[in-house]
Image (tube, coloured by chain):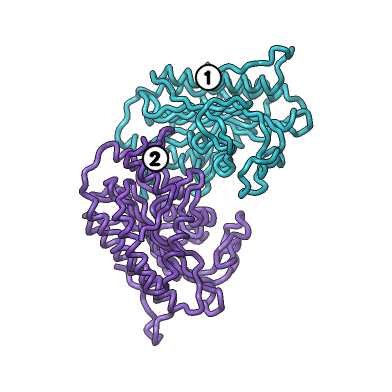
Chain colours: A cyan, B purple
Amino acid sequence: MVQILENPTAKQPSISTRIEKILLDMFENVCQTVEEIDGNKLHEKRWTRDEKGQWIEGEDNNGILYFDRALRNGNVFEKVGINYISMRGELPPGLTFQGGDVVMTDPKNGAASEKGTPFFSTSTSVIINALNPMVPTAHVNYRYFQIGDGTQPGSWWFGGGGDLTPIYLFEEDAVHFHQVHKEACDKHNPEFYPRFKKSCDEYFYLPHRGECRGVGGLFFDNLQSDNIETLFSFVKTCSEAFIPAYIPIVKKRKDMEFTEQNKYWQHLRRGRYAEFILLNDRGVRFGLTTGIVSAQSVLNCMPGEAFWNYNDQPTSDSPEAMLLDVLKNPREWV
Amino acid sequence: MVQILENPTAKQPSISTRIEKILLDMFENVCQTVEEIDGNKLHEKRWTRDEKGQWIEGEDNNGILYFDRALRNGNVFEKVGINYISMRGELPPGLTFQGGDVVMTDPKNGAASEKGTPFFSTSTSVIINALNPMVPTAHVNYRYFQIGDGTQPGSWWFGGGGDLTPIYLFEEDAVHFHQVHKEACDKHNPEFYPRFKKSCDEYFYLPHRGECRGVGGLFFDNLQSDNIETLFSFVKTCSEAFIPAYIPIVKKRKDMEFTEQNKYWQHLRRGRYAEFILLNDRGVRFGLTTGIVSAQSVLNCMPGEAFWNYNDQPTSDSPEAMLLDVLKNPREWV
């Protein structure tokens, strides 16, 4: 169990320390839950930078708490990737802030020799692929970014969300996942759920396939307000919603019977997931292009086994075709 | 066997018809060779456009000869994708020519309602993944593009090349593949082989992994000259070089013994191949974004089965580590 050390002389922890804590709690809780269900420990890797600024394995003592945990071919899970990072630093030259986002000014400039803009960033990312094709894949990520001390208007923002990707559609699972997330949103702002549900359908979409990645959930980016406490509280509720939204579905489906054909379809759908990650996901592309985190961490979200086949269209009226219909025509689940 | 009908009143076939013919010959020869070795027929799909300009299955009578052939889980091959296209048409609005390439002017504009620039384009693409991990994957593509009747300077160009991606390194195979391609080049211009070998190492490179995709071969793009006959003749020789460069390697390796560990490493390397295709390949990204061909055709190049694992670094001095060393430090093979 990793703990964030608070400054003993400060009367109240800073907002950045409090956000670090809730995301680290989420990280630890999800890891523990996965290990309990699977019966295997996640493998952990910690990261630090070498003198040239390259990411290498090791403990960091320069304001970075950064580690990945992973599992492959467990008892219940095919592949799990869970990453945590909390980083106080300076943006490397070549990166800057624009419209609430970190963007590249010059992709050729990768060296971190000059001093850049000071920032604080923290994030927890989770992706869970189960062995049983009746268990949907889940993805969740919450993140916070702050420029300087975050006191200037527009100098901090939240991003994140959670979404569900079934291999076979159980409508009650989609309803449950959305219901839990809607309740989390509704505690804070009744406009949040419809807005972030729509963003999720739009973001997790493969235009070349004309398919959504899954049945959605929540997605938000560059979320700001006049009052950071309001959004802190909202993101805390969301980060706590993932386990009750997803884990009951895993427990319900993990021992269901399945066929070779079900497994084949699962692998084809993993192929679609890989396509989304590598072709469409903005965060993955940004991470791999900038080197702001290690490529191995970024690709911790890849599925374990993915198939491609030229002829992968299911026969009509099959359970596989039912799933495709929902992916092509996103529904309102609650 | 598909045949291009030549205009019986013309005394000599046009250059575009002659290029169509050599690429179609290549397509048919590679298909036939693959079927002979595998013992299975390739599945064929023909494409045409519907009234809205969307690609659908069917025969085309509007100057387009476009079909894909594919094989999955044969006796020798895991996945083969072979595409041929020859198209006379007008560039859809939103696409234009720039610096010898087709580029997008406005990615949102996908409709083909207005008349655009007339062009002719033909291409054969081949990707061959074998079941036995001792057999390297091969990729080859030759293509020709022409604006109008191609009589204006800079209004036509060739692109293409062939490259080899071993799972396990047999140096003699890399030498053979390069030797055959070097001889093809040397018949036309002694500067071609070193130039296109270097381009190949540079193009088939995964920056986020710091690895080349394979041991290279040839790659050229936007190749022009004062005399189209010279380059026609060069590309013809290259298109004929692929079978003698690759097929002897397949025959030599396809029945070698292998272990579960070899198969696992093969699947991990397929994951790298998928990463290159989806993250780095300019042609794939262009094809998927523009819809200039169908997404299914573009993704006919995907591997059959790809694995990812957080810990995929081989132990030092292993055959797997030997391959990685060559991918990180491209060699001169001939």
Q: What type is the residue that disc 1 sits on?
A: Glu
Q: Nearer the viewer, residue A149 or B331?
A: B331
Discs 1, 2: same chain: yes
Q: Which residue is mark 2?
A: A306
Depicted B327 relative to depicted B183: above or below: above
* Residue position marked by numbered label 1 in the rendering: A28
Query: Horizontal and vertical percent for residue A181?
Result: 58, 25
Residue A152 location (% of width, % of height): 79, 31
Q: Horizontal and vertical percent for residue A79?
A: 42, 30
**How many callouts does the rendering have?**
2
Residue B200 image-quadrant placement: bottom left
Decide which of A106, B108 is in the foreground and name it.
A106
Q: CA distance from mark 1 to mark 2?
A: 28 Å
| Quarter occupied by residue B39 | bottom left
Front position in the image: A282 or A178: A282
Q: Splitting the image into 4 quarters, where does residue A23 fall?
A: top right
In the image, B12: left or right of A280?
Answer: left
Q: Chain of mark 2?
A: A
Residue A203 vertical placement versus A46 (above, below): below
